Amino acid sequence: MIDCNQFEGTSPLLDEKLQGELKGIFGKMETAVTLKAVVDMEEEKSREMALFLKTAASLSDLLTLELYTPLEAEALEFDTEYLPATGLYKDGIYSGVSFHGVPGGREINSFVLAIYNLSGPGQEIGRGLVKKIQKIKKPANIKVCVSLACHHCPAVVAASQRIAILNPLVKAQMLDANLYPALVERYGITRVPFVILNDETTFTGPRTIEELTGMLG
């Protein structure tokens, strides 16, 4: 593992005002969440991710950060093809939620919501919808390719990750499309949010949690 203490200072993505706001949100956490990240210390975005996560984890006693090298990635349950990558864990179990790239810009919202939804009761959604999500029987992977400046992307990311938190068969990934040109070329991504379902079906534009659930059900 990588020593987190080697990263000095705080992330410029989380200024003093935003840190204060996050402390209030993280103060509502009910159970501990561990952030496990795979970073390549030779890459700028990985170092940026490490400092971002260290700063975020410092805002709550219920948040823990573990940093791993790419050589250690095989021991982790989440997809590490696209680095830097961060998986969220609760009680030592992978939640199905991962972020690929630094969840800065507007994606800070989905990052915070993922922690909030995993750690406690989370955002309220209807009981009927919860039952539909929990009835999903087939394993599914939802990749949401985003731009950090996109207005619509965080809602799609949060919706997919809410589903993953409620059903262990579902995995939900946020990917900063700007970092992965091979992925963009493979799927011909021209606009975001761009959703890739089970590495096959693709669609562009906003989708609600109800719509995503219907596609998986």
Image (cartoon, helix red, strand yellow):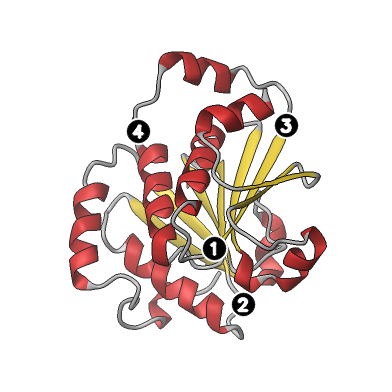
Q: Earlier in the sequence, mark 2 or mark 4?
A: 2
Q: How many marks?
A: 4
The kind of residue on which mark 3 rests is: Pro
Q: Which residue is mark 1?
A: 37
Mark 1 surroundings: few (<14), some (14-19) or many (≥20) residues within 10 A = many
Instruction: Name the kind of residue labelled 1 in the image.
Output: Ala
Looking at the rendered image, the disc whose residue lies closer to the viewer, 3 or 2, is 3
Q: Nearer the viewer, residue 42 or 214?
A: 214
CA gap, disc 3 and disc 2: 29 Å
Q: Which secondary structure lies at badge 3?
A: loop
Mark 4 and mark 1: Cα distance apart in space: 25 Å
Q: Residue at x 46, y 39 (%)?
A: 91
Name the residue carrying label 2: 40
Task: Write the residue at 35% across / 53% down.
Answer: 63
147 in relation to 78, above or below: below
Closer to us: 52 or 17: 17
Q: Nearer the viewer, mark 2 or mark 4?
A: 4
Q: Which of disc 1 and disc 4 is earlier in sequence?
A: 1
Residue under label 3: 139
Mark 3 nearby-residue class (10 Å; few <14, some 14–19, many ≥20): few
- Which of the two discs, 3 and 4, sits closer to the camera? 4
Q: Is residue 167 visible?
A: no
